[in-house]
Image (cartoon, rainbow, N blue to C red):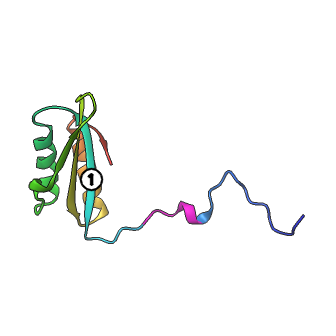
Amino acid sequence: MSDNKLRDLRQPPAAAVSAPTITFPCDYPIKVVGDAAEDFTATVCQVVQRHDESFDASSIEVVASRNARFQSVRLTMRATGEAQLKALFAELKATGRVHMVV
């Protein structure tokens, strides 16, 4: 047996614990998933516009699920900081129409 110390496999290595760093400001891609409805995209765009005044809604992509029960709205916004992103995610979820923000 070697002299190497045994490591606890229940704990992730120290390098895996640190979160990835994002350099702000940056273009930040987001996918918002919710129930399919005529005004879902407009609702998402209104919320994003409140957090990024330079947001261009013409660049969004809307994809329906296979059974057209859900929609995903894919967009890119200008992120200025972590606080902005947390506030955006919280407001999107508070609409009650958003199931997931990725």
Image coords of residue 83 (percent x, y): 28, 60
- Residue appearing at x 63%, y 61% in the figure: 13
**Residue pictured at 20% horizontal, 60% vertical:** 77
Q: Residue at x 13, y 48 (%)?
A: 45
Q: Position of residue 72 (x, y in %)?
A: 24, 42
Q: Residue furthest right?
A: 1
Choose top left, top right, bottom left or bottom right for residue 63.
top left
* Three-letter code, disc 1: Ile
Q: Position of residue 78 (x, y in %)?
A: 20, 64
Which residue is located at x 90 percent, y 64 percent? Answer: 1
Residue ID for mark 1? 30
Q: Is residue 29 left or right of residue 8?
A: left
Query: Residue 18 lies in magenta, yes or no?
Result: yes
Over which residues does the magenta segment extend? 15-20
Q: In the picture provided, is 14 more to the left or to the right than 38?
A: right
Q: Is residue 15 left or right of residue 58?
A: right
